[in-house]
Image (cartoon, grey):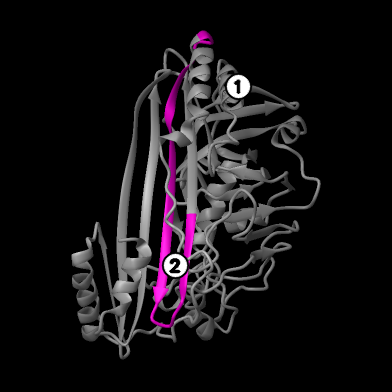
Amino acid sequence: MTPQEVVERALALPGADDRVVIVDEDTTANLRFAGNTLTTNGVARGSRLTVVSIAGSGTGVVSRAGVTPDQIADVVAAADRAARDAQPSEDARPLVAGEAAADWDRPAEETSIAVFRDLAPALGEAFATAEAGGRRLYGFAEHLVNSVFVGTSTGLRRRHDQPTGRLELNAKSPDMTRSAWVGAATRDFTDVDVAALDATLAQRLEWAKRRVDLAPGRYETLLPPGAVADLMIYLYWSAGARDAFDGRTVFAKPGGGTRVGEELAKLPIDLYSDPGRAGVECGGFTVAHASSRESSVFDNGFTLGPTKWIADGRLANLIQTRHSAEVTGLAETPAIDNLIMEGPAGGKSLEEMIAATERGLLLTCLWYIREVDPQTLLLTGLTRDGVYLVENGEVTAEVNNFRFNESPVDLLGRVTEVGAASQTLPREWNDYFTRTIMPPLRVPDFNMSTVSQAN
């Protein structure tokens, strides 16, 4: 059966008052390499059926993988039973009304190993260059295409095909004492310049030939776009309106309510999501497989548009369901699957920011980020694969790794320079969130709390 046929069959079965049916079709292709040699490749396929049944004020959700046509009724019956046995749903709202989208009947898209037709030869050339230069390359490339189909008993039929690609490259010196990492996010790998990425790795390993040990402390620090993405993604994930309204997070206003409208950054920084932004396009409607404090199954099919989270340095919106928007009195602004940060026009490149630095640190990426205090959004984590000393506009040495303690919210108020934004791949969170456009940032006093012994 096609995904559309599965949706229609599940909706047509008797039992519940209303239903939402979601079908996810996934295909994944990957390449892996180590020591300048391709090691494995493969393609995987998966499907999942999610049925949301509504009976009176109760809601039941059942999600199963690999459902065959003769098992659809079993999944629907299980969701119906769960709905009848459930307590009233706090987030219950009328389902989003609609009709069939123009592309509803189009087949699900998929990927294959052919997506790497240009990447694989480019990797082969990079392996040869690295071998000649005394470097070993490790890493992987992955391409996922998710086709999601959402149908409801109110007549709504919407679908979206989401390609997601990422490439991670790690270079090591032959004695394994020096290491550097770069990554790239892409929709189809046609825009990935492997030679340029390898050249960046070669430069960083060259910088690391000289080593300087530094004590913990606060240092002027240049954060590259990928590291900024990791911090801003955590801020975004922590921006639920209901938690803020209930006083649980850094976005709670003392005495009650939220901090929407307050200044967070002295510079005119914008942090926003836009489903149509070129290069990081994502689904234009809500897909909720389960309800939580930041999502609601009743909002499936809700149309998404450009949404400012921070506008000109001020907190503009928090992540809302239709239910939480009624509770907080704020706009309906559901989560969107991309994140963009920009500062004033004319921002410098990271290289230009290095050239303008008298003395400071240049990070490569952050790792093992964990929350310490939700009331301030204090995070801790480690630096990894290269922290470099910048002196008089040039990188002069690699320094030891650090553990850092920073709040991305507090950090926004201390940023002194925002560079030119570009599409980037976060290091820590790229298993979950890849569609980001971020600038490099200059922070005058980034807190390197302790020295890390990690190499």
Circle 2 residues within 10 Å: few <14, some 14–19, many ≥20: many
Please identify the residue farthest to the top as the structure is shown.
132
Label 2: element kind: loop
Amino acid type shown at disc 1: Ala
Question: Which residue is labeled 1 in the image?
Answer: 199
Give the image location of residue 73, x and y in percent: 21, 73
Question: Which residue is labeled 2 in the image?
Answer: 287
Residue 71 visible in the current orientation: yes
Q: What stretch is highlighted in magenta?
A: 132-161
Q: Which residue is drawn at 81% across and 46% down?
A: 346
The quadrant of the rendering that contains the C terminus is top left
Give the image location of residue 185, x and y in percent: 54, 41
Q: Residue at x 51, y 48 (%)?
A: 434
Residue 24 within the segment the image draws in magenta: no
Depth check: give the residue in front, 374 or 118: 118
Amino acid type shown at disc 2: Val
Looking at the image, residue 289 sits to the left or right of residue 435; the answer is: left
Depth check: give the residue in front, 66 or 268: 66
Circle 1 residues within 10 Å: few <14, some 14–19, many ≥20: some
Q: Which residue is drawn at 22% across and 79% down?
A: 82
In the rendered view, tell whether residue 245 sits above or below residue 169.
below
